[in-house]
Amino acid sequence: MDIDELAYWYWLTDVKGIGPVISKRLLDSFQIPIRVFRATPEEITKISGIKENIVSNIVRAKANIDRYKRLAEGQIKIAELLGGRILTSNDPYYNNFYSKHEGERALPALIHVLGNGAMPKAGCYAIVGTRRPSADGGGKASELAANLAEKGITIVSGLALGIDAQAHRGTLYAGGTTIAILGCGADIRYPNANSDLYTRILEKGLIISEFPFGVRPSSENLRKRNRTIVSFSDGVIIAECPIKSGAMIAARFAVQQRKPLFSFKYDSSVDNSGGDWLISKRLAVEVYQSNYESLFEASRGFVPFATNNTDKIFQEIWPRKISAKAPKIGSTTKRREKSPKSEDGKILKGELDRTQLQLPMVPSRKTSTSDLPGIFEYNVGDEVIHPSFGRGRIINISEVKDDYQITIKFSPRKTKTFLWKYTKLTRG
């Protein structure tokens, strides 16, 4: 694919208000993005489900096409350096999978792929859950992933700490195929504590992101990541999650997409209040054992939620809907925003303006960690305690030579940045 052609794909997928569902409707009518770009407002309005505000956004976004050409040029260079691929819904390698997902199940029209695995043709299940699982929950996630992988099922998850990581590890242990869907560029090892797991997935599986290489994680990107995890999957298993867990966002998307949704149950020593709530509302079906046979038996009892108004029922656990807007690729306007939150309700720094991503950005690799105080296991959003400034939350982590630079928000007016080896941090 040449630079100009790819630029129009970036342009289309970044127009305000256009997500996977709307982009699929447009591509079903116009086949390729440049035809959408050249279409008149009257031609676009004729497409069912395309509202006037979307048409206006398309017209306004045309002025930014040169920025997307620069972005496309840089992204192609990065893909070549990393041995990766940038796939569109028209690419045969991706189209066989993409074309089977209709309506609300639509996949992103543009994805960035690293790894040696093959794109699955069918048989994908997502396993998601809390970042801080119990031994029982983590064991069930790993065991179920391994058992499904032995049956030839591809396991999809988000490479987060906890349940996600256990699902990926269980699959790899069984010699199966796993796909990690990221809420940042496919070249970003986030969270850094799963860097070794990231490398193992590259060897036998796939790392996939709808975001350009080099884009940092943000709350909005992680939310979209959850949607894509569900879209890639034939069903979703909640291995263990509290009621406020980010896995509940994936559960909500599964209900919206009418995908089979499953959850384990535990005794009172395990906080699986999210999974229990889903079962109590008949949104999810209980799985009794961590094997293929139990999942298949549970699937017989699954009945899709009867209404399209998913928001109404989820307001019981999310009484106030908060929308954190991510910067657009072509945006140059700086604005003051409230600190966004991740799927686990933790403060997260917004993503970089993608117009900055025009030069190749190769993932950094540490040459030595011998002088660091132990294994680095902190993540953006973690609550920590500093000996001088007290309790705060990590809002950004970046690598500086062989150390980590950590930015911590202690209060609305106090934010400090430290090198990890000198912080003497403890977990809050």
Image (spheres, rainbow, N blue to C red):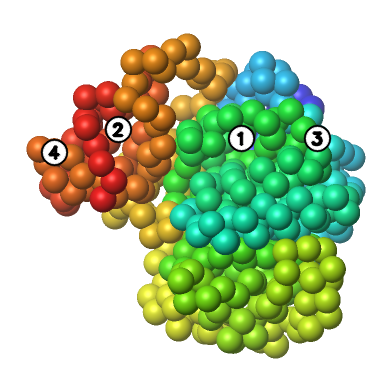
Q: Is residue 325 above or below residue 310?
A: above
Cα distance in 3D space between marks 3 and 2: 34 Å
Q: Secondary structure at mark 4?
A: loop
Q: Residue at x 66, y 43 (%)?
A: 169
The quadrant where residue 409 appears: top left
Disc count in the image?
4
Give the percent coordinates (x, y) of residue 335: 31, 46
Residue type, numbered disc 1: Leu
Residue type, numbered disc 2: Ile
Cα distance in 3D space between marks 4 and 2: 15 Å
Q: Nearer the viewer, mark 4 or mark 2?
A: 4
Q: Which residue is mark 3?
A: 117
Q: Secondary structure at mark 2?
A: strand
Q: Is residue 35 above or below residue 65?
A: below
Cα distance in 3D space between marks 3 and 4: 46 Å
Give the percent coordinates (x, y) of residue 92: 89, 40
Q: Nearer the viewer, mark 2 or mark 1?
A: 1
- Asked whether the residues under the numbered discs 2 and 1 touch, taking CB atoms below 8 Å apart as contact, a structural biologist would say no
Residue type, numbered disc 4: Pro
Q: Secondary structure at mark 3?
A: loop
The mark nearer the N terminus, 3 or 2, is 3
Q: Residue at x 66, y 16 (%)?
A: 81
The mark nearer the N terminus, 3 or 4, is 3
